[in-house]
Amino acid sequence: MSAPAAPIPASHAGAAPLGARILAQARYETVTALRNGEQLLVTLVLPLLALVGVHVTGLLDAPGRNGLDLAVPGVLALAVISAAFTATAISTGFERRYDVLAALATTPLGTVGLVAGKAAAVAAVLLLQTIVIGGVGLALGWSPNPAGIPPAVVALLLGAAAFTALGLLLAGTARPEATLAVANLVWVLLGALGGTVFPSRWAWMDLLPSGALGTALRSALQDGAWAPSALAVLAAWTVLAVAAALRWFRWRP
């Protein structure tokens, strides 16, 4: 990411260790996200409504298959997009508009601490989402494959990394109003057509980060298997999005 307009001090006498600063920022970001009604709606309430809706309507049920086996991994993928992309893009976009980012970058936290704090906050929210959505799924009758937990964790982490980088890229290049509109539109499109809640219908959809994440999670939690091609797609999106954010992110509008 390009440096902010104000210089970053080379040293900060008496400042807490970097790890403590990152932890403090992550705690602040997490509490703010959980107290924000709009963010909570997008990150938790809407994915849960999608899960319950798909279950009640039986859209993914088939002879010999419980629709929850497809629905829960898909909703977990949607939850990743909600927290890592949509919520991150919107909050960062408005922080950028009011010069909050540029101000924080000149403090002892620094740019590395700021980005690491945001990433840690996304991970904390994602953990909460996984517990709640998984718990509701189990209560409804979902039976995940225990062997799929390791590949599912890897898929969730790669998906969070890719979508966090994409969210920062959007927030750092577009105006806050445009970021708000685009982030919400992308969430709706990827939720309905991007291979998350509903499995990919066309091969090209698995090249999207949303389709790859949905495929990887379904393969893990339904079949207990790794999905190397889907994970490779997520890794590629992560590398490209991080590189693009480093190149084009602007700290001030």
Image (tube, helix red, strand yellow):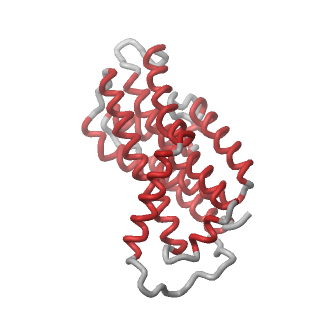
Choose top left, top right, bottom left or bottom right for residue 21.
bottom left
Q: Position of residue 200 (x, y in %)?
A: 54, 31
The C terminus is located in which quarter?
A: bottom right
Query: In this picture, is 174 found above or below 126?
Result: below
Identify the residue shown where x is 37% and y is 26%: 69
Identify the residue shown where x is 65% and y is 74%: 4
Left or right of residue 54: residue 205: right
Identify the residue shown where x is 40% and y is 43%: 227
Q: How many marks?
A: 0
Viewer-closest of 223 and 242: 242
Left or right of residue 210: residue 19: left
Query: In this picture, is 70 found above or below 236?
Result: above
The N terminus is located in which quarter?
A: bottom right
Viewer-closest of 74 and 125: 125
Identify the residue shown where x is 49% and y is 77%: 108
Choose top left, top right, bottom left or bottom right for residue 111.
bottom right
Looking at this rendering, what residue extends furthest in the left direction? 146
Q: Position of residue 106 (x, y in %)?
A: 58, 77
Q: Position of residue 176 (x, y in %)?
A: 71, 52
Q: Position of residue 234 (x, y in %)?
A: 50, 50
Viewer-closest of 105 and 198: 105
